[in-house]
Image (cartoon, helix red, strand yellow):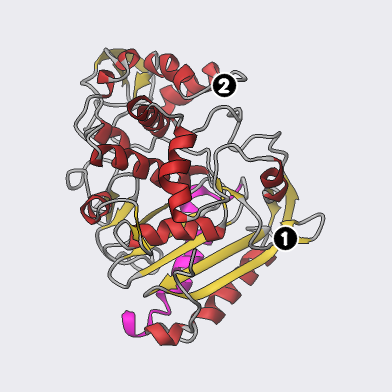
Amino acid sequence: MKELYPCASPAVVGLSAGLTEAIEQMTKTDLEDGLVSCAAIQVICKDKTVYKGNHGFADADGKVPLEDRHLFRMASMTKPVTAVCVMKQIEDGKLSLEDPVEKYLPALQNMEVAETDADGNLTGTHPAAPITVKDLLTHSSGLGSGPWFGKFCRDAGFAEGSTLGSKIDDWGHSLLEFDPGTRFSYSGLVGFDVLAHLVELTSGMAYADFAKEKLFLPLGMTDTCFLPNEDQWSRIVQMHETVEKGVIRPVDMHGHVFGSCPVTYHSGGAGLVSCLNDYTRFAHMLLCDGISGDVRILQDSTVQQMRTMQLRPLVPGTDATYSWGLSMRVILADNGSQHPLRTGAYGWSGAYGTHFWCDPVRQLCAVYCSNMTTAGGSGALTARHLEKAVMDNLGDLA
């Protein structure tokens, strides 16, 4: 596949010449402070790579330098991938945003909503309205969020050999945090796992196979998968955690891609393995409204829908500066130096320190890959540091 975004200096596209130094210094400081063991970063603007670099060690103890060949556990950066697969099924008439999920999954009929007192104690339940596909894509279903579900999920666990379909009955016996569509509350795993299973049911394909055939191979994402082969396992970076400032140590993931999920459970919410080059292709496709080079993955109107606010204004769980499109956070208003992204930007993060965003106004996207159990997810300092380094150096694009 031809190079879609050749390297160019930031000044060529109108960015500040200080962009490179800002990213290099930011990364150096984060490594020294022990926020990360490594960082792979790529920034594209106007179809030019204006920054790309690998920093630190894929294995800090073994002093293995991070390289393009290394892979990362993407965690919740899986969710936009799952959303693209769902939207492909919607474009093909196999699904609708307004479809009740129970139409395909009877186990999710007659769900109950938890009722709690001021101290969070369960006082009762009441019947829930049907959950829609849109509710799942916008984290407004109440499924898989809140303290009651967290306890239920821990108690239910994941048996060896679990698959997306085998857990549906469990999810059907859980309590919803709230009435579907009435608020936003992040569903870390289950909401998008249900969506991935809907892709299976409406396509007749295993979710991992669907994603590979319809998305990964057309985009040239040859190192992106849900079940790594032997070679890919050998190239996944060592997970680490921060012990104290400047001190990190390795974390044993016990052969799992995410949490305690068995490798048979190809989580649509968090089960992806990928690399900087591959995920950048995905992000750039979203930036370009569904097309990558001469390959179209989604219609431009579909991507525009994904990056547009889909919840009602100021629904509980959001505010005037941000809300949710279909799987991605969207920035509604500029919000100062602590929240550097500008109005119209969209993207998401992963629990282990991965992060990406697209800025259609400036024709810019950035991808950050690292793997730390202490990263902080969407609140990761490293994500804000990269955002600030880029947005402070917009130059003529400010």
Crowdedness near tag 1: few (<14), some (14–19) or many (≥20) residues, C-alpha within 10 Å: many
Q: Position of residue 41 (x, y in %)?
A: 55, 65
Residue at image mark 2: 158
Give the secondary structure at mark 2.
loop
First in sequence: mark 2 or mark 1? Answer: 1
Left or right? Give the position of 40 relative to 124: right
Q: Amino acid at mark 2?
A: Phe
Residue 348 visible in the snapshot: yes
Residue 55: name its quadrant: bottom right
Asked if residue 392 is among those painted magenta in the image, a careful observer would answer: yes
Crowdedness near tag 2: few (<14), some (14–19) or many (≥20) residues, C-alpha within 10 Å: some
Give the secondary structure at mark 1.
strand
Q: Position of residue 78 (x, y in %)?
A: 46, 44
Q: CA distance from mark 2 to mark 1?
A: 32 Å
Instruction: Find out whether the residues at labels 2 and 1 contact each other: C-beta distance under 8 Å.
Output: no
| Residue at 72% from the left image edge and 60% from the top image edge | 57
Q: Main secondary structure of the magenta part?
A: helix
| Residue at 33% from the left image edge and 14% from the top image edge | 123
Instruction: Indicate the quadrant containing the C terminus: top left, top right, bottom left or bottom right.
Output: bottom left
| Residue at 52% from the left image edge and 74% from the top image edge | 51
Residue range (magenta): 374-398
221 or 260: nearer the eye?
A: 221
Tell me: residue 58, above or below residue 182.
below
Q: Position of residue 165 (x, y in %)?
A: 45, 20
Residue at image mark 1: 57
| Residue at 57% from the left image edge and 55% from the top image edge | 275
Left or right? Give the position of 315 relative to 256: left
Q: Position of residue 342 (x, y in %)?
A: 31, 67
Asked if residue 106 is among those painted magenta in the image, a careful observer would answer: no
